[in-house]
Each structure stands twice: as C-alpha cells, then as structure tokens.
Image (cartoon, rainbow, N blue to C red):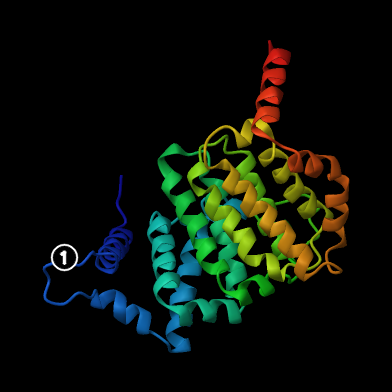
Amino acid sequence: MFKDTKQILVTDSLQFLLALLVYPIPEDAPVQKNFYRHFLGRLHRPQDFQFIVDGMNRILSQPLQEKTSYLPGAQGTANFAPEILMFFWEMTQCNKRFRSFIIDTDRAHDFVILTLFYALEYKNDSAKQGIVRMCAFMLQTLSVEPSFGKSLNKRFEGQESLPACIRINGFRGTYTDFLIHSIYTLITTSQGSFAAVYPALLAVINNIAPHVEKLSASGSSQLMHLFSSMSSPSFLLANETNHTLLHSLLESISCIVEHNYRKNPELVLAIVKNKKRIEALRTFTLESGQEELERRNRRKK
C-alpha cells in the first residue's frame, strides 16, 4: 500500500541514464556522437570504478542474500536489478578500462555468479526472457578479454553459500567448471526457448577455451553431452543454422586440447569415451541423417 519514493527515484534515474547512453543520434544531427556514452567510456580513475562496482554489486546481491537468509524479508529486494544489469552491460561495452579493472581485481568472479544467478532464476519466467538474453550477452562481452579466461581457473570456494537455484551439490571445481555447468543447465533445460542466445553462450566457452586448465570430470562430461546432443541428426537437421552451433562447440573442445592438452586429462578421457559418437559425425551425410530420423519416428510410433 505504500510506495518507496527513494526506490522510485533510483529506478527513474537509472532508466533516464540508460536512455541517454543508448540514444541513437539522428542522421541529420550536426554532431554524430553520443557524448554521454563517449564520456562514460573515458572514465579511468580506479576510485570511480570502485564506486560503480560496489554500488552495482550491493544492489544485485540483495536477492541472493534474501534467498540464503534465515530471516525471510530481511533484505529488501531491489526492483531495479534489470536496469543495473543493463548499465553494467553498457559499461563493459563502451569502457575497456572498466572491463580490465573488474578482471584484474577479481571482481569479475562476483559478476559471473550474479549474472548466472539472474539468468537461471528467470529462465522459466516468460516476462523476463530479455534479462536472460542480456546476461548471456554480458558474459560474452567479458569473455572477449584473455585475462578473463585465465582468471576463471581459480578454484571456486564457498559455493555452498549460494542459493539453491545455482548451487551445485558436491561441487569441487574452478570458476570455469561453474560457468560451463551453468551454461549447460541453461541450454539443456530451456527446451529451445533461448535458441536465440545459444550462439552467445557457446561463444563464451569458445572465448575462454584457450585458457582452460584442470577442467573437472563433470565439466568435461557436460561438454561431451552437449556435443552428443548437437551432433544428433534430429538437432542438425532441425534448421539451417544448428550446424554452426556444433561447429562452435567442436572448435572450443579442440582449442582446449590444442592449448592445454596435459592440463586437461579429464576432457581427453571424456573425448575417448565418446569415440563412437565422434566417428559417427565424421561419416554423417544428409541421407544417413534422414534415415536415422525415419528409424526414430518408426520406433516412437
């Protein structure tokens, strides 16, 4: 019955700032430059970045704290989390120094967890599919930096304190393992509703692939499960673009093996276990794929 006037003010301010940052300059304008976006990209002082990161982290962390608190409602859930996520995305796109700052100070780990939390939390909410897509694109933007992929090899401690929606039972891996597990969950549980962001999610794996070390047995197994699904005739022949997703995944697996063969024995073992599936893909033709689909349809009938 009561409205929080401060929250309304923050939400309106954020939306106004975002409108200025993404405003397309008309073609007939005398100056073809968005100066708001230009000067956001010029920020460089560490104390400015620290102020922005602390503020975003405090707001985005509230739902996680609320879900893990013993006192329901102890934390006020921020209704402007989508605006903060959008601001974070715009900031990482237009300011390379900001990207470097959050990676070099290990704050990227916090934002990976937060981004995956919102993606997994909203994946079944039809009204918030845009947030899930934005989270995928944010991870893709961060993964372009080589130092980001290297930083993910750090062991993930304290995973037990996360909310149930993103917690992995018995997890003992790195941030890379956690990221791959979450991407695997997003792809396999979406039932095609996020097909538009599959390329972005696979691009994240592709971008970090040259730097992956000590991939766990579960992470390796999930990569090969994705390979099995995407190399099946039913997936490859479903439309004209699915083969590009398989190509991206194969490129990632090959890249991990090429750059860090000795440091990823579990992945090598998983590849050997899937030898038959890999050989079946090598001999795959349109005719054999259609025959396989017909056999499956007959079995269903």
Front-lying residue, 116 or 242: 242
Identity of the residue drawn at 53% across and 35% down: 239
Residue 143 percent location from the top left of the image: 57, 67
**Residue 35 quadrant:** bottom left
The answer to whether residue 166 shows anywhere in this view is no
Residue 233 percent location from the top left of the image: 67, 32
- Per the image, the residue denoted by label 1 is 26
Front-lying residue, 127 or 79: 127
Q: What element carries label 1?
A: loop
Residue 159 percent location from the top left of the image: 72, 60
Identity of the residue drawn at 79% across and 44% down: 278
State whether residue 290 is above or below residue 77.
above
**Residue 68 quadrant:** bottom right
Identity of the residue drawn at 44% across and 37% down: 126
- Give the quadrant of the N terminus: top left
**Total number of numbered labels?**
1
The answer to whether residue 226 shows anywhere in this view is yes
269 left or right, relative to 95: right
| Amino acid type of the residue tagged 1 in the rendering | Pro
State whether residue 56 is above or below residue 130.
below
Identity of the residue drawn at 70% across and 44% down: 226
Residue 167 percent location from the top left of the image: 69, 52
- Give the quadrant of the C terminus: top right
State whether residue 223 is above or below residue 92.
above
